Image: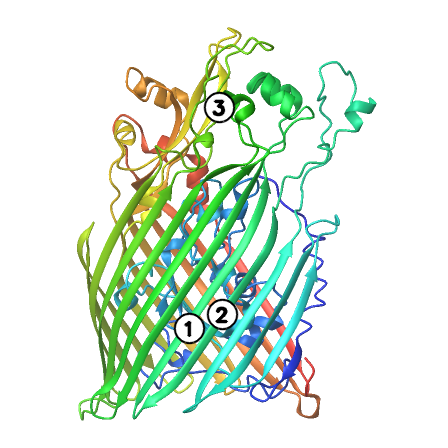
């Protein structure tokens, strides 16, 4: 894989984060020494008590304010979290024609991006409709939540629960939970501009961002946020020095020199027309009753270049029609058009006797359409379109939730017992819609002899074909009960139980026990044990795709045939011949043990060790070669499949790690304040079991490449350090 070398990092000429305040009535200016005076803040994620701070919780929680996120200088939320949280890692997008469509997900504790639950204002966020089969660290084969669609300007803080939480929040929370809390300002505003690029002079990035708050009646608010921008392509390649024209003998001949594809790009794709919009609001509607709502909308186009087909390749692989259309060769470009939106509305009711109720409904939709540009289906001849629409991927999610929490005073405990319970209903839909016929249907010239090359004219297969098209649906109903209590002044405990029914996978019940003991006001121990359950995403259950190559069989025979490279549905008849079967849910057990030390009121240090065991881990297999699948498919309707991959549950894994986090606020008196933060994470994932299926060994299905991604896809060690000097309005 190629890797961009950003001027040792991007020239983050951040004219940026040039955050020019419009009005700052509510928030102090960025860099003010008055901000972030508290070393510890009350948390929402990980507990339903209203009196627990991050350093007082029974599980490790990072609370990252908007100011801290902004001070990283990162271009998006994922970059900022990478800089601040030692447990957080962000797999970069793969390169090439598929790159622009991949959701920029996140990873906690070295696990995959779909093993992390992402919430916005405490409500479940929908995931992307697309996955990658490329070697994308821990994101290969995962349908992640796209964090790049939440603008930094919309974020009030981010809470990261670094602990298994399936019993508290439902599936997908094996590695932890990321809760993005949106701004709740009723006045003030901010606008900023960012510009950056690479030392090669390409990959220029431009982004305008901002927010504005408005007051609503009854102490309500409406906060609008946005970012908008684009990015030029960036390339890792040098000029192409191959001979493109058979009659020329040197790349220095005029015809060769004048070919405009000498500098075709291979790297980050170009992004255009990208904008993200967020609205967050709340208004009082009666005694103890509050209505709230928030919505997001995102759009972007990504143009990603594939490998250049020189004239020689066009002639031999596609025939004279292709060569006459593209005499200087063809640079295939895939345009991905993303539309993503979500809306949430709800009512909160609070009563001293009855407790707090929260009734909410949300809907999220992620749709991705793809188009091949500079394309040709040779079997259609001159009638082949230049641009071929290659299909649509759509992922939809609907949630209905009812949550209740109440504190019950009791003489048996040092503080009231917090009891919470809730019901949740979720509907998921995943649809693959085929592209236009020119993308997968052979025309009248298919398999006829080309009058110029003498070879048989091939077809064209790209995107979603009529074979891949599918629609899947799932419904999930769940209920939970959570008890949290301060047993004594020094000892707190929490117990959570959640049962869920999946329409496609049946019933599951998971639990979590968390404990904390404060030896002194300065030193405490905390720990937890929990079970988890993650059903395969519908994207993983329903994905099917294939590409076709024209190869000479046997070599030197002049007999050119089409062979398929397939990603098979796990429950398909083809996959069954290779030992595949319908996917099972992942089951996990999490253990965590930690210490918290507060030597001073303005200093803290915490260390947490953990172990995460996952059985039936969902993994996209290696691409099995013809030497493996050929003999198995011989004599079947699938004999033309020469390479195949499919999702499987044959691997079990164990992840061990330790995380260290420290912060210190140094008062410099007349010279302001110095904030020091440091974090360290060490993690190790091992495959503990790899089962054989059918007549194929587990070592072939999950080969060295995939094993490497699972075990070493995220950094084994990560160290972060930051120092921020704050003096009046300067930072």
Say the numbered circle drawn on residue 278: 2
> Mark 1 = which residue?
294
With 49 as the anchor, is 718 left or right in this view? right
Number of the front mark, 1 or 3: 1
Q: Which mark is residue 561?
A: none
| Residue count near mark 3 (Cα–Cα under 10 Å), binned few <14, some 14–19, many ≥20 | some
How would you rate the neighbour count of disc 2 (Cα within 10 Å): few for under 14, some for 14-19, many for 20 or more? many
Q: Residue 626 placed where, x, y %?
A: 40, 21
- Where is residue 532 shown, x and y percent of the image? 27, 59
Quadrant of the image containing the N terminus:
top right
First-in-chain label (3 vs 2):
2
Q: CA distance from mark 2 to mark 1?
A: 7 Å
Label annotation for residue 549:
3
Position of 43 relative to 672 (above/below)? above
Quadrant hosting residue 57: bottom left
Sort mark 1 into few (<14), some (14-19) or many (20+) by Cα contacts within 10 Å.
many
Provide the secondary structure element on which disc 1 rests: strand
Q: Which SS class for mark 2?
A: strand
Q: Position of residue 215 (x, y in %)?
A: 49, 87
User: What residue is rendered at 18% in x and 93% in y?
Assistant: 411
């Amino acid at each position: 894989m190629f890797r961009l070398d950003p001027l040792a990092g991007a020239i983050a000429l951040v004219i940026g984060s040039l955050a020019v305040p419009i009005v700052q009535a509510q928030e102090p200016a960025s860099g003010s020494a008055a901000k972030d005076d508290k070393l510890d803040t009350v948390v929402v994620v990980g507990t339903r008590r209203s009196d627990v701070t991050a350093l007082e919780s029974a599980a490790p929680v990072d609370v990252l304010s908007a100011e801290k996120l902004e001070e990283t200088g990162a271009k998006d939320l994922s970059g900022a979290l990478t800089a601040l949280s030692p447990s957080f890692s962000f797999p970069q997008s793969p390169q090439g024609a598929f790159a622009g469509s991949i959701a920029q997900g996140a990873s906690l504790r070295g696990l995959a991006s779909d093993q992390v639950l992402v919430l916005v204002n405490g409500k479940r966020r929908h995931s992307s409709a697309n996955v990658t089969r490329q070697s994308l660290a821990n994101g290969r084969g995962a349908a992640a939540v796209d964090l790049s669609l939440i603008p930094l300007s919309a974020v009030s803080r981010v809470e990261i629960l670094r602990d298994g939480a399936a019993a508290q929040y439902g599936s997908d929370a094996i590695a932890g939970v990321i809760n993005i809390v949106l701004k709740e300002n009723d006045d003030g505003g901010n606008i900023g501009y960012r510009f950056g690029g690479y030392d090669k002079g390409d990959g220029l990035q431009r982004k305008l961002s901002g927010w504005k708050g408005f007051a609503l009646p009854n102490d309500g608010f409406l906060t609008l946020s946005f970012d908008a921008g684009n990015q030029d392509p960036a390339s890792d390649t040098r000029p192409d020095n191959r001979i493109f024209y058979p009659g020329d003998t040197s790349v220095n001949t005029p015809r060769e020199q004048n070919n405009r594809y000498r500098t075709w790009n291979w790297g980050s794709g170009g992004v255009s027309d990208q904008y993200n919009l967020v609205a967050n609001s709340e208004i009082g509607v009666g005694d103890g009753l509050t209505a709230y709502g928030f919505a997001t909308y995102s759009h972007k186009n990504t143009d990603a270049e594939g490998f250049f087909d020189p004239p020689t390749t066009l002639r031999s692989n596609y025939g004279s029609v292709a060569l006459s259309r593209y005499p200087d060769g063809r640079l295939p470009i895939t345009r991905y058009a993303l539309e993503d939106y979500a809306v949430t509305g709800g009512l909160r009711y609070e009563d001293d006797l009855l407790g707090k109720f929260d009734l909410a409904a949300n809907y999220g939709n992620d749709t991705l359409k793809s188009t091949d540009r500079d394309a040709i289906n040779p079997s259609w001849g001159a009638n082949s379109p230049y641009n071929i629409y290659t299909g649509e991927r759509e992922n939809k999610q609907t949630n209905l939730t009812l949550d209740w929490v109440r504190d019950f005073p009791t003489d048996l405990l040092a503080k009231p017992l917090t009891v919470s319970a809730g019901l949740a209903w979720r509907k998921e839909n995943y649809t693959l819609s085929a592209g236009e016929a020119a993308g997968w249907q052979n025309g009248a010239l298919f398999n006829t002899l080309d009058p110029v090359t003498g070879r048989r004219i091939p077809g064209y297969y790209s995107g979603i074909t009529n074979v891949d098209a599918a629609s899947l649906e799932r419904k999930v109903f769940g209920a939970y009960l959570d008890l949290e209590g301060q047993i004594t002044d020094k000892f707190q405990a929490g117990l959570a139980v959640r049962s869920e029914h999946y329409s496609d996978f049946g019933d599951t019940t998971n639990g979590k026990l968390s404990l904390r003991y404060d030896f002194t006001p300065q030193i405490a121990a905390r720990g937890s044990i929990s079970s988890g359950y993650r059903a395969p995403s519908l994207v993983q259950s329903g994905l099917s795709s294939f590409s076709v190559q024209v190869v000479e069989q046997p070599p030197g025979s002049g007999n050119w045939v089409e062979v398929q490279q397939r990603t098979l549905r796990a429950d398909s008849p083809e996959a069954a011949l290779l030992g595949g079967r319908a996917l099972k849910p992942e089951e996990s057990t999490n253990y965590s043990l930690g210490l918290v030390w507060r030597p001073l009121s303005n200093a803290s240090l915490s260390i947490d060790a953990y172990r995460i065991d996952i059985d039936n881990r969902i993994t996209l297999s290696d691409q099995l070669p013809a030497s493996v699948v050929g003999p198995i498919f011989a004599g079947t309707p699938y004999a033309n499949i020469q390479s195949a991959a499919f999702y499987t549950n044959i691997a079990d894994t164990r992840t061990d790690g330790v995380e260290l986090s420290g912060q210190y606020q140094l008062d410099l008196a007349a010279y302001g304040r110095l904030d020091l933060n440091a974090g360290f994470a060490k993690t190790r994932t091992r495959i503990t079991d790899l089962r054989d299926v059918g007549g194929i060994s587990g070592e072939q299905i999950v080969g060295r490449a995939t094993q490497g991604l699972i075990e070493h896809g995220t950094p084994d060690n990560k160290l972060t350090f930051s120092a921020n000097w704050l003096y009046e309005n300067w930072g």
